[in-house]
Image: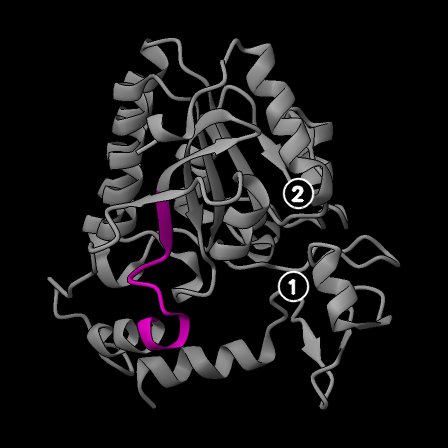
């Protein structure tokens, strides 16, 4: 038995944790909530920003939807859209990294797992980076790290506040140390942004884990999170086996982290834009012409 087969066999026998998948009904008109099992009309769910009206469960949404929710209509100007990942290490497990990149690009229409750009939010300027979990689990490789670093540097240059929407499984193992280096690079860019007395807010969505949590996700002036988002570094099972004790049921949820001081505020998706606007105004951000955001 190969090492890969051994790990695959172990995964089948181990409980990983509650990972919800949005279940579509066969006709495509109805969706069953993965949290409360309520069946809702798809159009109603979309109009409610993909939040279950019965239990308030926040379904995962893609980067385009997130940008539409946050930014003023037509104001978002994407930056560095041409950057695309390569395979510098020639990495291969069961499949080559190059094949996985091509598959993710074909399936999502994205070049990599983050979209960055400038926009306005209720006429207030904002530099925005939105990670997309659909692309290889939102993992952070060289391109993700470079795009986030560049938008931070642009925000520093333009004296813009910054919002990074996090949704990631952590560092991209197929890029090895090149991926881990992005943690330091992004953190260094954020230090320069802060030295100009500029506001940085991460929004932690489900899930935010690994190297992303260990770096820029926890470096905000105000750390925001969506309800019940999974937020942590190591996996629950790893921690329990290391400590040899049972963890609380709500461990690594946004609510648990809020209670213990790691998150500043939990924001319902429907209230996000107004909440961000209030925070920006409190911090002295002034309205700008749309033409100034380019």
Magenta stretch: residue 107 in it? yes
Q: Nearer the viewer, residue 271 or 139?
A: 271
Circle 1 residue: 17
- Disc 2 and disc 1: Cα gap in Å? 19 Å
Residue 204's place in the image compared with 31, above or below, is above
**Residue at image point 34% right, 16% down:** 159
Residue 34 position by quadrant: bottom right
Q: Residue at x 52, y 39 (%)?
A: 71
Tag 1 secondary structure: loop
Q: Is residue 84 left or right of residue 90?
A: right
For the residues carrying marks 2 and 1, which lies nearer the camera in this image? 2
Query: Relative to 9, is 166 above or below?
Result: above
Q: Under tag 2, what secondary structure?
A: loop
Residue with the mark numbered 2? 226
- Name the residue located 40 percent from the left edge and 14 percent from the top edge: 198
Expressed as whole percent of the image width and height from the top left, the position of residue 281 reads: 58, 14
Foreground of the two, 99 or 130: 130
Q: Quadrant of residue 91?
A: bottom left
Position of residue 4 measured from the top left corner of the image (x, y, whole percent)? 34, 81
Q: Is residue 208 visible?
A: no
How many residues crowd around disc 1 within 10 Å: few (fewer than 14), some, or many (20 or more)? few
Question: Which image quadrant: the N terminus?
Answer: bottom left
Q: Which residues are magenta?
A: 105-116
Q: Residue at x 71, y 47 (%)?
A: 228
- Labels 2 and 1: the sequence-earlier one: 1
User: Circle 2: is it few (<14), some (14-19), or many (20+) Cα within 10 Å?
Assistant: many
As displayed, is residue 6 above or below residue 43?
A: below
* Label 2–label 1 contact, CB within 8 A: no
44 displayed left or right of 168: right
Q: Could one spot residue 148 in this view of the protein?
A: yes
Residue 192: in magenta span: no
């Amino acid at each position: 038995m190969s090492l890969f087969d051994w790990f695959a066999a172990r995964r089948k026998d181990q409980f990983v944790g509650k990972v919800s998948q949005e279940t579509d009904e066969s006709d495509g008109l109805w969706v069953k909530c993965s949290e409360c099992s309520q069946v809702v009309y798809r159009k109603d769910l979309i109009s409610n920003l993909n939040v279950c009206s019965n239990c308030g469960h926040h379904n995962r949404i893609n980067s385009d939807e997130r940008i539409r929710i946050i930014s003023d209509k037509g104001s978002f100007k994407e930056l560095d859209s041409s950057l695309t990942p390569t395979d510098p290490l020639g990495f291969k497990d069961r499949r080559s990294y190059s094949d996985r990149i091509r598959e993710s690009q074909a399936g999502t229409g994205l070049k990599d797992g983050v979209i960055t750009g400038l926009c306005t939010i209720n006429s207030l300027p904002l530099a925005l980076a939105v990670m997309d979990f659909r692309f290889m689990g939102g993992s952070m490789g060289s391109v993700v790290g470079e795009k986030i670093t560049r938008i931070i540097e642009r925000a520093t240059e333009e004296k813009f506040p910054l919002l990074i929407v996090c949704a990631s499984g952590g560092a991209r193992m197929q890029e090895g140390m090149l991926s881990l280096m992005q943690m330091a690079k992004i953190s260094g860019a954020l230090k320069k942004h802060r030295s100009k007395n500029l506001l940085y807010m991460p929004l932690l969505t489900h899930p935010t884990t690994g190297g992303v949590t260990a770096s820029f996700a926890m470096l905000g002036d105000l750390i925001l999170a969506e309800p019940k988002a999974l937020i942590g570094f190591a996996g629950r099972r790893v921690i329990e086996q290391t400590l040899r004790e049972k963890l609380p049921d709500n461990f690594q949820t946004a609510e648990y982290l809020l209670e213990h001081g790691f998150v500043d505020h939990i924001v319902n998706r429907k209230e996000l834009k107004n909440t961000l606007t209030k925070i920006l105004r409190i911090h002295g951000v002034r309205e700008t012409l749309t033409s100034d955001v380019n």
